[in-house]
Amino acid sequence: INLFPYLGIEDPQWLDGYLNINDGSASLELRLRDMIKLGQLYLQNGWSGDEQILSSEWIEQATSIKVETYFPEIPGYGYLWWLPPGGGYMAIGYAGQYIAVYPERGLVIGAHSSINNDQIYQSQLLQFIHNQIAPIFDGFSCVNILSISFHIFSSVVLRSVGKKPYFFHIRLAIINSCLSRTKPLSLTSVSNL
């Protein structure tokens, strides 16, 4: 099944491999808005409006530990979703592209980063999303959509490495859905997200 038409995602860039078929695990370029839609689909147990696109059983399987990674930051891996300690799941892309889903908070966070970032930046950004941004939404119960472009100096958020300060230059999109919502958001309409 091709999910993109069901989510209103048009013509994403995805590198082809053997026989012009992508392997489904890497090299997908999405707009930040489309990344959030993918996370929201999983948050809504596969539903977009009145239509179930993915089964809730698949969502449960995909976001459950299938492999122990032995990485302290992300100790588990499901089907293309990384599982950090303390709940939620994340899609982690090249150089700091993230989709973080926190079902217990009704929260999806997407991050676009510059592609010339090193591993230290990516690790610290991951920790910032998981340990600093997501907890802000504990106790929220209704939709608050926030789209921000910003710079944050390393001494506030990131540790400096040697004498080199690190800066975040990221775009974040955050959606905190009503946990009491009776009908899932329709993900095909761009105006919804």
Image: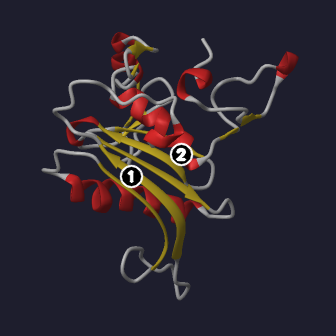
Residue beneath the point at 70% across and 35% down:
12
Q: Does residue 3 sit above or below 114 in this rendering?
A: above
Residue beneath the point at 33% across and 53% down:
130
Q: Is residue 107 left or right of residue 115?
A: left
Where is residue 188? Give x, y as percent: 52, 29
SS class, disc 1:
strand
Q: Does residue 110 sit above or below 169 in this rendering?
A: above
Q: Quadrant of the N terminus?
A: top right
As drawn, which residue projects farthest toward the right? Answer: 19
Q: Does residue 136 sit above or below 91 in this rendering?
A: below
Where is residue 164? Give x, y as percent: 56, 84
Cα–Cα gap, marks 2 and 1 = 10 Å
Q: Is residue 104 left or right of residue 35?
A: left
Residues packed near mark 1 inside 10 Å, few (<14), some (14 to 19) or many (20 plus)? many
Q: What residue is disc 1 on?
A: 174
**Between residues 183 and 16, which one lies in front from this camera angle?**
183
Q: What residue is disc 2 on?
A: 33
Residue beneath the point at 82% across and 25% down:
17
